Image: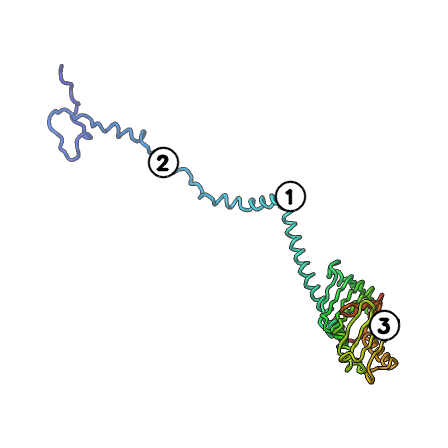
Amino acid sequence: MSTPPGPPHGESAWARPTGQPEPHGNSTPPPPEPSAPPTRQMPAGGGEEPTTHIPATPPQAPPGEAPTTVLETPGIVSRTASVLRDPLALVLILVTVVALALAGLIGAELIARRIGDSKVAKATECVVNDKATASFGVTPPFLWQHITGNYTNISIHTAGNQVKDAKQMTADLSISDVDLHGTGDSRGTIGSLQATLTWPAAGIKETVQSMVPLLGNLVSELKTNAQNGTVELRGAFGLATVVVKPEVVNGGLSLQVQKLTGLGALTLPRETLQPELDRFAAQLTKRYPLGLHADSIEVTDSGVVARFSTQNASIPRTDDPCFANL
């Protein structure tokens, strides 16, 4: 076998290394470099196209920005609409509003009631010269009573130190149907006023000693008898005794002498003592206001209980300082 002929014009210039002189004569060309074909195929089989394609994809917006901007308002609207469509939520809202309104009304009611109680109590204290407490009826609410000028029930209780000149007397008053729509010389009317006066034996003795000069120095002991309804006033060592019976006479109180005993100068004539007792009883009740009159009087083992009343009484317009703030 003969050797194949070489290239007709010798070795090509591109196969000769750079800077190497062209060889003289015929020589066998070097075999092609094994890496040449892969080098020519890399552009087609390499990973450049996927790498180039991935960066070419438009970058997505950072998560949260676009959704937040787009969904914020619709979310609030959606939640509001959801609440409005939820019956339970509507009920809760309604209950909350009603509760707040009721709390405000109750607060105003309590404050107004306390002011009203205080004013009536102070007026009573000024009249009876003793401490007193007052309270208005629960129904209707005080605010409504004040707006309409009609008061259904008022209760008053004194401390029991005195009622005017009567020492240790306690007064309990129940007033109803007060109408403050005054006309002319009247500030209004009182439908009903009931007063219960409780007077213990010790208070009666103290009052008699200070208000009945004829008996004041003689009375050292006082005893009530519930069985026969009498009051017995005894002098020192039992040397003088006066027995009187409290009665209601013409809407007032009267102390009728039942028995007188004594020794010598200590014996008091009835015609002298009875007028003194009449003046004493009249002085106790003469300044009771609004036409208040006695209905009954009861003697107990511890004292005397009297009941007074008046109906449809007119409230006069007066400059009495006790009623200036009412």
Residue 84 percent across, percent down from the top left: 63, 45
Quote the CA–CA distance across marks 1 and 2.
58 Å
- Which-is-in-front pick, marks 3 and 1? 3
Q: Where's the C terminus, which quadrant?
A: bottom right
Task: Give 56 or 129, whichever is nearer the viewer.
Answer: 129
Q: In the figure, 276 relative to 67: above or below?
A: below
Dot 3 falls on a residue whose secondary structure is: strand
Residue 117 percent across, percent down from the top left: 72, 66
The answer to which of marks 3 and 2 sits earlier in the sequence is 2
* Image-based side of 138 in relation to 25, left or right: right
Q: Which mark is residue 52?
A: 2
* Residue 225 makes an appearance in the image: yes
Q: Which mark is residue 252?
A: 3
* Image-based side of 137 in relation to 275, left or right: left
The answer to which of marks 1 and 2 sits earlier in the sequence is 2
Dot 1 falls on a residue whose secondary structure is: helix
Neighbour tally class for label 2: few under 14, some 14-19, many 20 plus, Cα within 10 Å: few
Task: Give 266 or 23, whichever is nearer the viewer.
Answer: 266
Residue 142 percent across, percent down from the top left: 73, 61
Q: How is the image coloured?
A: rainbow
Q: Which mark is residue 87?
A: 1
Quote the CA–CA distance across marks 3 and 1.
69 Å
Q: What is the quadrant of residue 177 in the picture?
A: bottom right
Q: Amino acid at mark 2?
A: Thr
- Which-is-in-front pick, marks 3 and 2? 3
Q: Amino acid at mark 1?
A: Pro
Q: Residue placed at 18% from the left, 28% from the top?
A: 12
Q: Residue placed at 84% from the left, 72% from the top?
A: 245
